[in-house]
């Protein structure tokens, strides 16, 4: 597994890349744009992979996703990947003002339409015909040429994971993922989709020979001088994620309905400490890597077979955690490089 992290800023990143961090990713929210962050990554790194993990799939047209990647490719050829996420129903409807129904079908077509632009050769029309996207672009300027940039889908539940296996190059796992969720839900679904998939050229066929890529976020908070604070930050991050009902199948799978009911009640009451207290030791141990450096290394060794196979983004908690403290967590996580057996 390649050690990665969400973009920590150029100052931390220089030290991180020198220490062996092999991938940086960019998230997206109301206050930061995924592609602007990737531009910062490629301008301030030399060798690491770089890409959105994730960009909101429906916030931009397939054309806009592809043109951003083409421009970034000029600066970082061979280093890019594209992670797309469908985003929550409410974000699509209320924030982005785009259709929010049938997100799985929409994102499958988005992948195909983005690839149509990325794979376009000079002198050829860019064509794609689907229910949600139709392209027929005659680009006369010699600005194209095929780019084989891996496209990954953020997939939490089984249907999206199967879609990632069917139409994309792999999957991006959420920070909540446990070993049980990877091994019993996500990986089997991706494999089912891969067996009945679509090649990068849009040709239906058996894709089982090419193992899907696995990237994934890992909630990581390491502080040898204040491990209890790091643990509390990890608990709050887990609790904040679990306020979202999209993750109810995950909660039911693990039998965590009672503590999740408690943390959601605390969230409604504005009781962030109560949210953290509702996260059980079992939940913390299965989801996060936190505490002292020794604790974190032990957790990684224990979970070695159930972490993302290709890139693990050791992500500092962000819920009610300052930028300075997130940077400190990022630096502390560098001590974990090499802790996961090959």
Image (cartoon, helix red, strand yellow):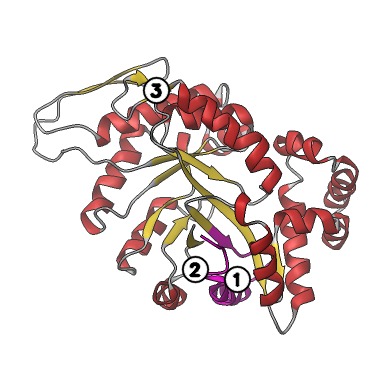
Q: Which residues are magenta?
A: 313-342
Which residue is disc 1 drawn over?
Answer: 326
Which residue is disc 2 drawn over?
Answer: 8
Q: Quadrant of residue 42?
A: bottom left
Label 3 crowding class (10 Å Cα cut-off): few <14, some 14-19, many 20+? some
Q: Quadrant of residue 331?
A: bottom right
Question: Which residue is drawn at the image coordinates 39% and 28% (left, top)?
Answer: 207
Front residue of 208/212: it is 208
> Which mark lies nearer to you, 3 or 1?
3
Q: Is residue 319 visible?
A: no
Task: Name the spot of residue 50 as percent of width and height, x first.
Answer: 38, 56
Separation (CA) of disc 3 from disc 1: 43 Å
Front residue of 32/194: it is 194
Report the side of 72 relative to 82 (left or right).
left
Report the side of 146 relative to 36 (left or right).
left
Q: Total label count?
A: 3
């Amino acid at each position: 597994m390649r050690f990665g992290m969400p973009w920590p800023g150029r100052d931390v990143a220089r030290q991180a890349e020198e220490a062996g961090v092999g991938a940086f990713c960019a998230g997206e929210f109301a206050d930061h744009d995924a592609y602007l962050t990737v531009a910062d990554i490629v301008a301030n790194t030399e060798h690491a992979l770089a890409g959105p993990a994730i960009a909101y799939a429906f916030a931009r047209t397939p054309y806009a996703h592809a043109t951003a990647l083409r421009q970034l490719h000029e600066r970082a050829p061979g280093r890019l990947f594209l992670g797309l996420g469908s985003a929550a129903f409410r974000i699509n409807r209320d924030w982005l003002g785009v259709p929010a129904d049938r997100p799985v079908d929409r994102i499958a077509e988005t992948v195909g339409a983005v690839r149509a632009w990325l794979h376009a050769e000079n002198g050829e029309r860019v064509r794609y015909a689907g229910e949600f996207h139709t392209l027929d672009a005659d680009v006369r300027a010699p600005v194209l040429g095929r780019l084989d940039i891996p496209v990954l889908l953020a997939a939490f539940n089984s249907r999206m994971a199967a879609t990632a296996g069917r139409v994309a190059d792999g999957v991006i796992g959420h920070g909540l993922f446990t070993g049980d969720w990877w091994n019993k839900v996500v990986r089997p679904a991706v494999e089912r989709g891969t067996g009945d998939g679509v090649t990068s050229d849009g040709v239906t066929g058996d894709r089982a020979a090419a193992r899907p890529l696995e990237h994934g976020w890992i909630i990581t908070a390491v502080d040898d001088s204040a491990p209890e604070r790091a643990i509390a930050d990890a608990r709050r991050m887990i609790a904040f994620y679990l306020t979202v009902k999209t993750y109810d199948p995950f909660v039911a799978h693990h039998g965590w309905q009672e503590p999740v009911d408690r943390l959601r009640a605390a969230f409604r009451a504005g009781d962030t400490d109560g949210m953290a207290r509702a996260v059980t030791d079992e939940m913390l141990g299965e989801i996060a890597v936190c505490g002292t450096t020794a604790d974190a290394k032990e957790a990684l060794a224990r979970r070695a077979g159930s972490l993302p196979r290709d890139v693990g983004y050791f992500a500092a908690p962000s819920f009610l955690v300052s930028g300075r403290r997130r940077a400190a967590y990022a630096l502390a996580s560098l001590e974990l490089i090499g802790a996961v057996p090959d």
